[in-house]
Image: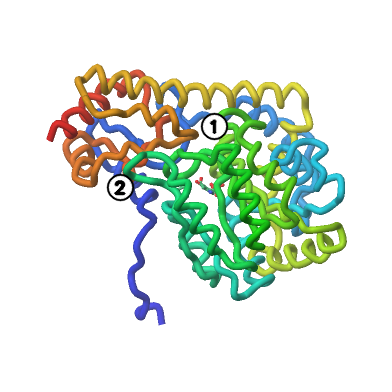
Amino acid sequence: MFAQLQPVATDPILGLMAAYKEDTNPNKVDLGVGVYKDGQGHTAVLKCVKEAEALRLKNEDSKTYIGMAGDLGFNNHIEKLALGVGHKALLANRITTAHTPGGTGALRVAAEFIKKANPNATIWVTSPTWANHISMFKAAGLNVKEYTYYDYATKGLNEEAMFADLATVPAGDVVLVHACCHNPSGMDLTFAQWQRFTDIANERGFTPLVDMAYQGFGSGLDEDAKGLRYLADNVEEMLLCSSCSKNFGLYRERIGAVSIMSADSKVMEITRVNLLSVVRSIYSMPPAHGAIVVANILDSTELTALWHQELAEMRDRINNYRQLIIDKLAGEGVQQDFSFITRQHGMFSFLGIDKAQIARLRSEFSIYMVDSSRVSIAGLNHSNIDYFAKSVATVLQG
Ligand code: PLP
Ligand code: TYF
């Protein structure tokens, strides 16, 4: 039976990670996968995480099953982190949350849940989007369509075309929107655009699915959630997938959450049992470690303050490098306008260089970025920024 299987394409981002590992050039630069690196090129465990892990070791007194919804303390925290303490949907008991294996697990559970609620639903994603969105939704049996989002010519959002596409979405479909730090383009909705998105969701009767994988990496924890909070204030139903991979640096621990907001607490109760039945049919119960670590941090005023500080450090380092890239390229005599880089948010920048230039950067200079020209800015540091700028200037000059 297995001999009948056909090869499948690997995830290009993970493929890039493997190719980088194998490259023996001592000057190689990894701008591929969205993983934070510090000024020394290292992905360190956050100090707040180390302390929270020590607490877990000390305090944990059982390894019994955690339950399908996972850690209830974590779920409570993550809802408040996303929506703000005292959000009206939380007070009205309209939200149910399950902690999941990563944000990816949250998206897969959300997809299966949508399939259950409306087997004919189409899910609309931004063009472009994180490639995993499309493959995962298709794997769950959903139809996937794209709506206009990024405009490669203006290096901004194509607002009118986006809203024109959204105005065609039928009731009963789902529209995925990135909460902040759009992957891959770095271009986010303005607050006015969130308001317009909300109006169209209500006019058309589609259900928003907000994917928040980078809360705190754009402008701040509350600032990055401002749009989704407005949306949650003004629609009856919504799905939210969160990830703690980036903002807590817990990548390999696989911790995220799916939260579903219903019109009232009665519907929420039915939603909850359906959500849990989806979880049960996939992995029964999530792994506990990441959830307990995050809950330990958010339970403690001191550890929360330390986390805020460490998160701000990561955010500020990336944002400082946005300007530095522009300055260094100008310093190398590049005439092209790269000022758009400071208008982008989060881990990534879309450089807007072409495929041949990207291939040359990789083959001649061992600089690795995704084919779309997406660079993970945290891969840059004082030791490689000049090499990066010089190499980009060389390929731009043809
Ligand atoms: N959504 C987006 C847009 C992402 O970029 C990612 C990846 O980091 C995820 C979801 C899921 O992340 P993870 O499964 O690592 O928590
Ligand atoms: O886009 C990125 O780089 C991150 C990390 O299969 C990632 O979202 C990439 C690919 C993947 C899982 C995570």
Q: Which amino acid does label 2 sit on?
A: Asp
Beta carbon of the mark 2 residue lies under 8 A of ligand 2: no
Residue 23 x, y percent position in the rendering: 25, 40
Residue position marked by numbered label 1 in the rendering: 218
Label 1 element class: loop
The N terminus - image quarter: bottom left
Direction from residue 245 to residue 236 in the image, left or right: right
Image position of 212 (left or right of 229): left
Residue 130 appears in view: no
Residue under pointer 2: 371
- Please state which amino acid type lies under the numbered disc 1: Gly
Label 2 or label 1, whichever comes before in sequence order:
1
Quadrant of res 31 = top left
Q: How far apart are marks 2 and 1 (CA)?
A: 23 Å
273, above or below 75, in the image? below
Residue sitting nearer the eye, 302 or 342: 342
